[in-house]
Image (cartoon, rainbow, N blue to C red):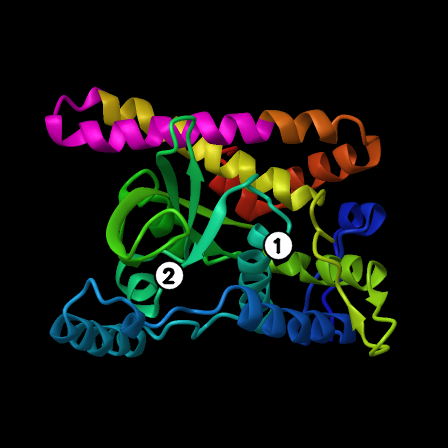
Amino acid sequence: MFSRASSLQRTEGFGGYGERLSNVEFNLNDDYLSLEAKECPVPSEAEFGHIALKQRSADLVEAKSLKEEHKWDEGKNEAAKIFERFLMVEISRSLFFGDAEVIRTTRFDDYKNGVDLVLEWLDDDGNPVRLAVDLTSGASPDVLEKKRQKIGSLGQIRYFRSENTKAASISAPLVVLGIDANFLQEIAEFAEAHREIDKKTRQSFLPKQTFADHPLKYLLLEQAITQLEKVLPEIVSIKSPFNNERIAKIRAVLAVLKKVNREALEKLKTDPRALRAFQLLRTISETHKKLAFLG
């Protein structure tokens, strides 16, 4: 049984979500299970030779223990799981954060350090600029508040490798990005409307940048920028040499994000319908308002 959407949601096309998945939501789940496996699979700790075998073995044991202790995913409904998988894939597929390389983390860094992925850009001098990301989708108020308390900290990633960086252990400023899981139906309907048919296989598929200009892109950019701008003055006010690295990394990330956001917003302003959808979504998404510190 599906829950009834609010009058505002029904009028503007953002419906509610109940306990069962619709057919289009099931289709979306199938799509993104496949896309995740192909485009952003979870890397194995065994792939990282810069960490001693003994340490890797211990980390695998700890990751398993952490998963069981904290019961990862227990209590999440199916919509939340699908939505977080969707966000993981589309941040990469649809270039939500410009030309950033999206690096998936291992289970250890996910469970131990709360980092789902790392965004990496190169600055004008060819130096890597990185942002650690924790994805969420309408977590309980208590869980969401705990996540917000981590914003601006230096997320630790023990197992890291990118096109620009050999296997290493790194740290990067952390942000928490997400939106309410009850918008999954609308996301699924959007995907369904943009499917194409492969002429050879006759199978339907989602083109590479189906969601490239979707309002979600602008919400996630707003969340990341607002979070780092909010915590930076607090960090700067703490007179400690230990904060210098964190301050420098946050400022570097903000410079990149603001450039990406400026370019994105200029494009958004040319599409009145997309602009209205963005403004509506940022108003009715409770998760967004909390993560963007809008209330």
Left or right: 172 in relation to 34: left
Looking at the picture, which amino acid does disc 1 mark? Arg
Q: Which residue is mark 2?
A: 105
Q: In the rendered image, is residue 266 in sight?
A: yes
Q: Nearer the viewer, residue 117 or 45?
A: 45
Number of residues whose C-alpha sits closer than 10 Å to that of mark 2, classed few (under 14), some (14–19) or many (20 or more): many
- At 70% from the left and 52% from the top, the residue drawn is 209
Expressed as whole percent of the image width and height from the top left, the position of residue 204 reads 81, 72
In three-dimensional space, the C-alpha distance between marks 1 and 2, rounded to whole angstroms, equals: 17 Å
- Location of residue 191 with respect to 170 vertically, above or below: below
Q: Nearer the viewer, residue 76 or 93?
A: 93
Q: Secondary structure at mark 2?
A: loop
Looking at the picture, which amino acid does disc 2 mark? Thr
- At 46% from the left and 72% from the top, the residue drawn is 75
Where the N terminus falls, by quadrant?
bottom right
Left or right: 289 in relation to 217: left
Marks 1 and 2, the one that precedes in the sequence: 1
Q: Nearer the viewer, residue 201 or 77?
A: 201
Left or right: 119 in relation to 56: right
- Location of residue 239 with respect to 127 vertically, above or below: above
Classified by dominant secondary structure, the portion drawn in magenta counts as helix
- At 85% from the left and 76% from the top, the residue drawn is 200
Expressed as whole percent of the image width and height from the top left, the position of residue 86 reads 60, 61
Q: Secondary structure at mark 1?
A: helix
- Location of residue 185 with respect to 23 vertically, above or below: above
Expressed as whole percent of the image width and height from the top left, the position of residue 221 reads 55, 37
Q: Which residue is mark 1?
A: 93
Magenta stretch, residue numbers: 237-261
Q: In the rendered image, is residue 19 in sight?
A: no
Number of residues whose C-alpha sits closer than 10 Å to that of mark 1, classed few (under 14), some (14–19) or many (20 or more): some
